[in-house]
Amino acid sequence: MSSQVVASQPAWAIEGFLETRDGRLHIDGADAVRLADEYGTPLFVFSAPRIRSNIRRLQQAAAAVERPIKFCYASKANSNMAVLRTVRDAGIDIEVNSGGELFKALRAGFRPAQIIFNGTSKTDAEIDEAVSAGIYSINVDSIYEIDLVEASARRLNKRANVTLRLVPEIGTRSHLGLQTALLTSKFGITSSEVAGAFRRALEHPELLHVSGIHIHVGSQTPDVEPFADAFKAMWEHLVRLHRETGHTLEHINLGGGIPVNYLRDRAQADQLPEHERAMLGASLEPVDVLTAALRVAREQARDAEAEHLFDRVTILLEPGRSVISDAGLVLTTIRNIKRRPETGDVWLLTDAGYNLMLSMNNYKWYYHLISASRAAAPATVGYKVAGPLCDSGDVYFDIEREGRLPDYRLLPIDARPGEVLALLNSGAYSLAQMFPYNGRPLPAAVLTGEGGQVELIRRRDTYEDLLMNDVW
């Protein structure tokens, strides 16, 4: 049987990564249907070459702007140990949001100097773990938390590195739930508080080393302006702090937010609201973000005669979605079919529900659905698609009828039970957020490599695993 790549690839294809061969989906050369047969479905599939390619894109952006950039992968997007290993080996650092993520980062081989710790509600134990490890920075989220970190440093007789996270009221064209620089969000220290926060953090330099300032405007941001505005706000605070206290900050942290294009295949894009299309189809490049931010910084540095401060600042970015989202997909099998004569609808019931893709339920997030079994066939028929959960909201459309997802998914004619489907661009905030609702054991995950190599990176749960922490 021929394994040649079809000359004309679908719009969703990515050369060398997602391609059709012999009519079926191949991932780094591995046959998706064979993966489904061997490992069962639902199945998470991640691509090590695509992760490395996404990281190279970031590194090339840094080289283009000729500035020291510290990239810290946002492990909340996906903290599977094999994924962390791939990220580490690709040469970037890491951002964590809990003691558990800190534990995993250290176990995966990241050095303390490579780790930054975010979060709004850190426990005393988590702060102690971060201070004890001597990580690059603890990003403090409130003036109250400054006291907590200082108390930990005193307890452990160590000096802690801290960065102040600000919330400067910068909006974006992303989903409201993903915007984190608004005063309505739970994150950060407000602009009116920041001067007092810096004074408080500088009171005991033997316990706290104030190393930087941080603003994260939010995830899936389609425009450069919010990043530039955030950098401008942080730069102004950096200059003012230096002039008033003589203290020089070492880094400015722009957070994450670099978007992923979820609409490479735009066959159903016109069924999404205009603002959703702009967000989900964003094509903003990392080099554009860095160029815009640095242009603002250079102008301000020149106007304030502070070029010497600009030259000493390292820029941090916390990419998560842009590293892992399009490097992962979910394979699912059609298990049932229903025909509704009254409406003319054909329903396809799969084995992948919102317990595996929480964002599809929470944010009505669009993951492009294709047939892995018939990847080269025209997708011209609209089907109602739903998952297996005993919950009416477990559907691949917007059950609230607000038009945030297509009502029907386009697949080849005569889709039927046993056919393997693939939800693309689902590598971020899926595996990390899954839960065993309805007593459904959590799925396996594999990592593909060059030439179709496949590595099991998460075993499928068993029924016994459902009892693991129950006391009875």
Image (spheres, rainbow, N blue to C red):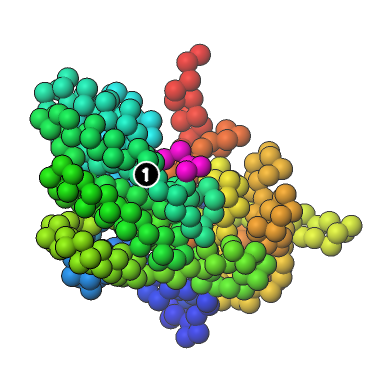
- Can you name the residue that lies furthest to the bottom here? 7
Q: Position of residue 191 (x, y in %)?
A: 37, 44
Q: Residue drawn 17% across and 19% down?
A: 155
Q: What is the total number of numbered labels drawn onto the structure image?
A: 1
Main secondary structure type of the part rendered in magenta: loop
Q: Nearer the viewer, residue 14 or 37?
A: 14
Asked if residue 74 lies left or right of residue 169, the reply is: left
| Residue positioned 50% across, 29% down in the render | 466
Quick one: 394 or 31, which is closer to the camera?
A: 394
Q: Residue furthest right?
A: 342
Work out whether 376 lies above or below 278: below
Instruction: Answer above or below: position of 154 versus 394.
Output: above
Which quarter of the figure has residue 469? Answer: top left
Q: Amino acid at mark 1?
A: Ser
Q: Residue at x 23, y 35 (%)?
A: 199
Query: Relative to 471, is 335 above or below?
Result: below
Local crowd size for mark 1, using a 10 Å CA cut-off: few (<14), some (14–19), many (≥20): some
Range of magenta residues = 183-188
Nearer to me, 237 or 426: 237
Tell me the residue that label 1 is attached to: 191
- As for residue 44 lying within the magenta part, the answer is no
Q: Position of residue 242 (x, y in %)?
A: 17, 48
Q: Residue at x 64, y 48 (%)?
A: 387
**Residue 398 in the image, given as x and y percentages of width and height:** 68, 53
Residue 352 in view here: no
